[in-house]
Amino acid sequence: MTKRKRYLLCGHGESLPMAEDGTTSLSSVLEELAVEVCAEAVSARRCVNEEHFDFVWVSCCEGAEPINLAAACKRDSPQTAVYLVTADRTGSVASRAQAAELDGIVSPAELGEYLLKEAARNIDGDRGDGESVALALPDSEGVRQALTTAKTQEENRAGFLLTVVSGSGGAGKSTVATLAALLGARRGLRTALLDADLQFGDLAALMGDAPSVPVEEVARTGAVPDELSGAPLVLVSAPRALERSEVVAASMGSVVDVLVASFDFVIANTGGGWDDVHLLLLERAAASLFLVDQRASSVRACRHALDLCLRCGIATGSFLLAVNRCTRHAPFTSIDVSSALDGAHVAELADGGREVEELLGAGMAQSLVEASSPLCISIEGVLDELLPLASRPASAGVQAPLARIGLAPKADAGLRGKQRKRKGRASRREAALAKGAS
């Protein structure tokens, strides 16, 4: 007796179109083929781990972006054929699918057609050899072209993408991203500042009269305007109208492709609420700067966001945590935040005072850089940790390349040196208190 193949659909079956005349119901097809359906990401991964399936199709599960869930399922069960179900076959999607070693990409219509054929063969008893209908969809010309385009873009890619995030709003992402972009341009790097806070981004106001192009224009044309090609720093501003944000979000992968292929250094600023754009930018980033401010709620939100990254399969090894607005009397230091986050390396960004808000509010961010604001000096230290050695000027004083992006140098200078000094003072205080108590 021929062993029937087992299928798992990760998503909502209602998203798959069946017969156009409506004569074939989805439920009957799924029942005929004994297709298991999981609408939630955690349940889907549990099924893949605990049971054997011949085919897994990932569509729109709750709790994870489809490409992330598909990658996790393939990693959990490499021998299983895992397909991403999406109508989006851009180079960005194809590149991510290829990197995850998925077996292919199919559209909802193509998968629906495949299921109908399989069900018909079951009903007709035409399965004498035990073979199923061939699913040659991943080798279609459209997908092959998309993969070729993605591979070419990957080979030509030279830019360094830094994503700036936080667990909640108000941590200073816009300020830090703006100043990091100006400091990167001052290092001689062709720099793009991407405002990925698509609903309420205000980097255009902070950057004053800097050369800029709306993000929807880059998404539409697939290029940065020629007149901006020679500018040392270009702002890719948030959509002009809030209602365009969802449309732009769907094209964010291609926007990142364009910028990373066109610039040496790309800084992506994000919004306060986490969404698929956050996860995409974190996945694609060479390094990510994770900001925590002086509120206890910010530390808790940071932990929640890091947990989300782990659940979505996003590697956090390239993250650099930084506590913002540090002064002598600040509630939290890097040591405090590091302790709350299980000993993670945490940098410190100095509090620039009222001058930062006043100048940024007037669109005079460049003045902060020229005045060597304490905040700018500390951001320079972070860039020393994150940027590749080849991009640093000789005056930076860096003697050896970093062993890994996101980790501080082993030398005693810099941010870690400051942390050790502060930790030493804390240890002496604790010893004195213990001696007094005895």
Image (tube, rainbow, N blue to C red):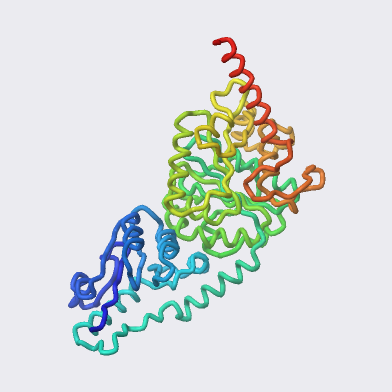
Q: Quadrant of the C terminus?
A: top right
Determine whether, in the image, residue 268 is placed left or right of residue 380.
left
Q: Position of residue 27 (x, y in %)?
A: 19, 69
Residue 296: percent from left, percent from top: 47, 29
**As displayed, is residue 362 above or below residue 95?**
above
Q: Residue at x 55, y 65 (%)?
A: 221
Image position, residue 60 (x, y; %)? 35, 61
Quick one: quadrant of the N terminus? Answer: bottom left
- The answer to whether 241 is drawn above or below residue 12 in the figure is above
**Residue at 23% over, 75% down:** 33
Residue 267, given in percent of the width and then of the height, sits at 61, 49
Give 320 or 262, whichever is nearer the viewer.
320
On the rendered structure, is 16 left or right of 198? left
Could you say which quadrant of the image residue 351 lies in? top right
Q: Is residue 375 above or below residue 144?
A: above
In the image, taking residue 292 as reference, residue 234 lies left or right, namely right
